[in-house]
Amino acid sequence: MSTENEGQAVPGEPAAPSAPPTPPVPPSAPPAPAPSPAPSSAPASEPTAAHPAHPADTSAQGAPTIQGAPTVQAVHAAPEAQHAAPAGGWPPPPPAVPSWGAQHAPVPPAPAAPRKRTGGLVAAVLAAALVAGGVGGGIGYWAAQHEDGGTGSTTVSSGEAPASFKRDPGTVAAVAAKALPSVVTIQAKSGGSQGEGGTGTGFVYDQEGHIVTNNHVVASAADGGTLSVTFSDGKSYDAEVVGRAEGYDVAVLKLKNAPKNLQPLPLGDSDKVAVGDSTIAIGAPFGLSNTVTTGIISAKNRPVASGDGSGGSNSYMSALQTDASINPGNSGGPLLDASGAVIGINSAIQSTSGGFGQTQAGSIGLGFAIPVNQAKNVAQQLIKTGKPVYPVIGATVNMNDEGEGAEIAAKGTGGTSSVTPDGPAAKAGLKPGDVITGFGGHQIDSGPTLISEIWTHKPGDSVEITYERDGKSATTTVVLGERTGDS
């Protein structure tokens, strides 16, 4: 954010105009000696530079960490920012200018001098306009009024423009202005002695004071920690966790002493989103609250295993991919369409850091959002019961291999059967060693991809599965079962 134009003074006019020619001297009088020229004004000095992997078996507990799977980094809550005053002071002092009204001795006639000095002033103004665009208009107007009496100039002042300028509905500015009052910045602090935590984002879900965000934003404060929510007008409220879904990376908070007249953000339909649709992301990247960025939908149905950076567990999503700039602190914020409706919850980014470690990655244009249709279902579950409900097929699949489908493992956790007896997969005729290559019309290339697709559905949904057995392809229909809770 450049503020290089603030605080600069308008340059003064030249010290004094050139003196008129000396009047004629009578013949009888001796010629008057030429007066010494007044010391020239000193040149103007230049300013100084101034999270939770789920079971490999979607019905079992404690899935292994994915290796070789398309795992990306969760958009971590940004650590609390620390600010330091820039060295050297800011802003730099304005350039020195000659003082007005200074007394000067007469100077010899110099017909060409005034034109050269005026040209120099205009050239300087043009250069300033290129370097410091915001102040260029004001200086240009001043120069036009003072050059050669100010006649013939068509330059007008922009002083009245902001009052009459209106932003049409549907523009980014209009959408942002309407949505910002319903987007909040979340401060989470753990209950430990160190009080660790960070900053994330959420949005108003209903008029009762429920806020939807990512699980990894509030996880550190879920057990004995504190949560505060700040609106765009600067007002803050304490909040508490209503429920968390680690596998979906969704959490719901509720404001204590919620204000009246809360305005929930409208929810869109993520199933109807098309690649190329415009997107608007709002959040607090690196603690910079109320930041708005734009982009498009780059892809749909991206299978994403989103790690929390701790090396522990993952969340799975069939994500919306966007190139809108998303950074740590955008976590849990809304991804809006051009009408201002929520189509996703910003959750993860792809990083080029090569590892997680302590260095937080920044945006490279590969952001991933939980589709709002899935997030809405999860939020409703959490508000109703405080616990998430996951659809399952009742089979343990291999989570390491990819490219050939999701293979049902030979054995389950602890040597148990990989296909739950009388479970959904068993009833559909699936067996250990079968390789699932299609699920509900979507291609499956790995175990994480299969879980991502399963979790876009609800328990009880009937879904067609394509699988291979002994080199032959076949199809069957599975009725999804359910598992309640993360533990």
Image (spheres, rainbow, N blue to C red):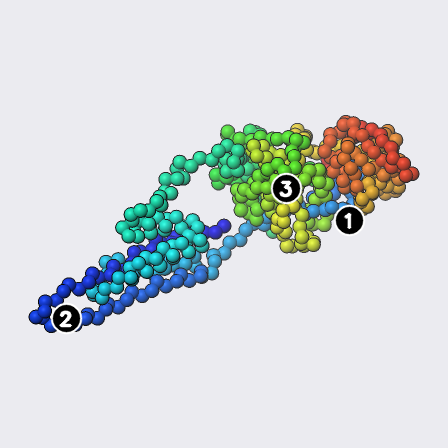
Label 2 CA crowd tier, 10 Å (few <14, some 14–19, many 20+) = few
Q: Residue 2 — which label?
A: none
> Residue 381: x percent and y percent?
68, 30
Front residue of 319/99: it is: 99
Numbered disc in front, either 3 or 2: 2
Numbered disc in front, either 3 or 1: 3
Taking the image as shown, residue 364 lies to the left or right of residue 148, namely: right
- Residue found at x 10% / y 67%: 26
Residue designated by label 1? 67
Q: Using the numbered discs, state the Cα–Cα distance from disc 3 to disc 1 in whole angstroms.
A: 25 Å
User: Which residue reaches farthest left?
Assistant: 28
> Residue 37: x percent and y percent?
23, 69
Residue designated by label 2? 32
Q: Using the numbered discs, state the Cα–Cα distance from disc 3 to disc 2 in whole angstroms.
A: 82 Å
Front residue of 299/153: it is: 153
- Residue found at x 83% / y 37%: 436
Q: Is residue 297 visible?
A: yes
Q: Disc 2 residue type?
A: Ala
Q: Using the numbered discs, state the Cα–Cα distance from disc 2 to disc 1 in whole angstroms.
A: 99 Å
Q: Disc 3 residue type?
A: Thr
**Within the image, what quadrant is residue 127 found in?**
bottom left
Q: Disc 1 residue type?
A: Gln
Mark toward the start of the polypeptide (3 vs 1): 1
Numbered disc in front, either 2 or 1: 2
User: Which residue reaches farthest right?
Assistant: 470
Mark toward the start of the polypeptide (3 vs 2): 2
Assign a secondary structure to mark 3. strand
Residue designated by label 3? 322
Mark toward the start of the polypeptide (2 vs 1): 2
